[in-house]
Image (spheres, helix red, strand yellow):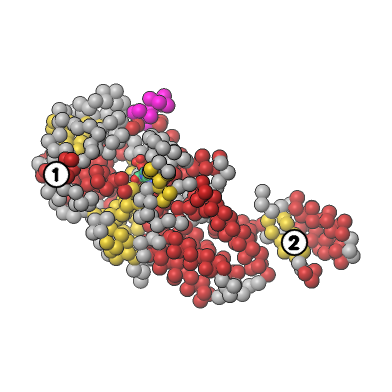
């Protein structure tokens, strides 16, 4: 029996308990990156959230199909179809072909994800590989009377979709007064958006395809509806993104999808709040732009940033400072030291307490099943780590569970320690010789043999009563 899971739904504005619509498997779609630059650590906070969500759902005993898109065409600098073409601008800057640029940053994105312990979604769909599907989608919207052509572009007519604005709670008249950067005079209504660009201002757009409306390329919003439906069907359980998607991108996705389907599309909408720096939200165009690589160059591990992410709830804005990252680093490293200590103890002490492990797993999961409260789940983790009555072996078992959701290399460290403690005949011989040397008070020989072990990466620590402990020497 799967466990009860509840998450905050931006649409219902409350925490909803959810089950798969089809009774079998959750269908989840997450808006992916626009691959025109490296992902900054703010973008990655959103993907950390989505990965926590996927792992939590699976831990609760459900099946899940997780789909994410890669935007490699069509995203303009403003989500509302104004400004420059992000990909074109970057390709010019880097003197690369647009698709080479896209692949470069897609690869970099997945490397960053892996460094943060984020699993690749089950399906990753590139916009440029689904153009025909998008054309079919737009054709049907046109047939149903939701689209119009103006000045060569195909637009979605939001006045035909009375529920437009239901996610963000704005109605279309409010949107008229919204701070739009520049108005497109071809639109019938300010909230209308482009489904297909033909006579756009980007005459130099390299990626163009034939369509019933002329050669051109798709708008940004249509790709998500098209690919979500292609891989997940007509009903989605969960759709995720960052909070910036709520007022435009996700409203547009809802309008075109529900117009296309004639029924409700998504049950639960979930959005991650921003990572902020002192000047406001971290963004690619302004303020401080930090990547995982930049943090590594400054001497941090990706795990330190992962730990930092876990210390705040996904719906709360997180303030990034190096002081906060240092604090996450110190806490994480003290956890790693504890793990090494537990491993050494467990090597000589086989006692276990499975009830304690189960209780801690239960408490840890309960916080995650309740809208992904990772800070509280971390508190449960530390309670176990510091519990003097919990056997070291059981602590390690519990921490392995923690790592199945938090993915911050704890299991790797646990296994690494095990590997290094595999004592070869040669090591065993040196240890025996050293014990003899110590029994004979031959300290010089004992020190020489200790150095020999150190050269093999093994630290030997003498304990009272002639006992000793072995551990791996960190490089
Ligand atoms: P983009 O590649 O610009 O389309 O953005 C990728 C993802 O990062 C989207 O889900 C955005 O909502 C999210 N995002 C952008 N800026 C931030 C930020 N400062 N903090 C958290 N998420 C962000
Ligand atoms: Zn999207």
Ligand 1 falls in quadrant: top left
Q: Residues within 10 Å of mark 2 (few under 14, many from 20)?
A: few
For the record, the magenta segment spans: 88-99
Which residue is rendered at x = 38% and y = 25% of the image? Answer: 92
Q: How many marks?
A: 2
Which x, y percent locates residue 5? 34, 65
Q: In what element is the residue under mark 1?
A: helix
Residue identifier under label 2? 461
The quarter in which the N terminus is drawn is bottom left
Picture residue at 41% right of the left edge, 65% below the top = 367
Q: Closer to the camera, 279 or 62?
A: 279
* Marks 1 and 2, how far apart at CA: 73 Å
Residue at 30% x, 31% y: name it: 85
Q: Circle 1 sits on which residue?
A: 173
> Quick check: is the Cβ at mark 2 less than 8 Å away from ligand 1?
no
- Contact (Cβ within 8 Å) of mark 1 with mark 2: no
Depicted 202 relative to depicted 393: above or below: above
Circle 1 packing at 10 Å, graded few (<14), some (14-19), many (20+), is few
* Quadrant of residue 393 within the rendered picture: bottom right
Q: Name the main secondary structure of what is drawn in magenta.
A: helix
């Amino acid at each position: 029996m799967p466990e009860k899971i509840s998450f905050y739904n931006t649409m219902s504005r409350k925490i909803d308990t959810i089950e798969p619509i089809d009774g079998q498997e959750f269908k989840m779609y997450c808006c992916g990156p626009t691959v025109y630059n490296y992902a900054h650590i703010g973008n990655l906070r959103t993907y950390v959230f989505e990965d926590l969500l996927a792992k939590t759902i699976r831990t609760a005993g459900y099946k899940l199909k997780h789909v994410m898109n890669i935007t490699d065409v069509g995203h303009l600098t403003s989500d509302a179809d104004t400004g420059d073409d992000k990909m074109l601008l970057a390709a010019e800057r880097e003197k690369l072909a647009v698709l080479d640029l896209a692949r470069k940053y897609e690869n970099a994105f997945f490397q960053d994800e892996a460094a943060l312990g984020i699993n690749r979604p089950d399906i990753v769909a590139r916009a440029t590989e689904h153009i025909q599907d998008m054309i079919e989608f737009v054709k049907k919207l046109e047939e149903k009377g939701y689209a119009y052509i103006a000045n060569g572009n195909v637009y979605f007519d939001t006045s035909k979709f009375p529920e437009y604005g239901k996610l963000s709670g704005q109605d279309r008249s409010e949107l008229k007064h919204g701070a739009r950067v520049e108005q497109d005079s071809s639109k019938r209504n300010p909230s209308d958006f482009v489904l297909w660009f033909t006579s756009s201002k980007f005459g130099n757009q390299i990626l163009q395809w034939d369509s019933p409306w002329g050669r051109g390329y798709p708008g940004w919003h249509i790709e998500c509806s098209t690919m979500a439906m292609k891989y997940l069907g007509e009903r989605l359980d969960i759709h995720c993104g960052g909070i910036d998607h709520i007022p435009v991108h996700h409203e547009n996705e809802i309008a075109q999808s529900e117009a296309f389907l004639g029924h409700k599309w998504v049950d639960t909408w979930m959005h991650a709040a921003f990572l902020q720096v002192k000047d406001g939200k971290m963004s690619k165009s302004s303020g401080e732009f930090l990547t995982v690589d930049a943090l590594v160059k400054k001497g941090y591990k990706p795990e330190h940033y992962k730990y930092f992410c876990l210390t705040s709830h996904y719906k709360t804005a997180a303030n990034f400072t190096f002081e906060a990252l240092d604090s996450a680093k110190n806490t994480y490293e003290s956890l790693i030291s504890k793990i090494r200590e537990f491993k050494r103890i467990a090597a000589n002490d086989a006692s276990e307490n499975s009830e304690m492990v189960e209780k801690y797993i239960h408490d840890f999961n309960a916080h995650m099943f309740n809208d992904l409260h990772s800070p509280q789940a971390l508190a449960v983790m530390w309670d176990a780590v510091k519990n003097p009555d919990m056997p070291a072996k059981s602590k390690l078992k519990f921490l392995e569970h923690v790592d199945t959701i938090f993915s911050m290399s704890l299991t790797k460290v646990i296994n690494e320690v095990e590997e290094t403690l595999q004592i070869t005949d040669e090591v065993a011989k040196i240890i025996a010789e050293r014990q003899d040397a110590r029994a004979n008070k031959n300290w010089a020989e004992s020190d020489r043999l200790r150095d020999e072990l150190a050269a093999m990466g093994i630290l030997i620590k003498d304990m009272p009563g002639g006992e000793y402990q072995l551990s791996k020497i960190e490089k």
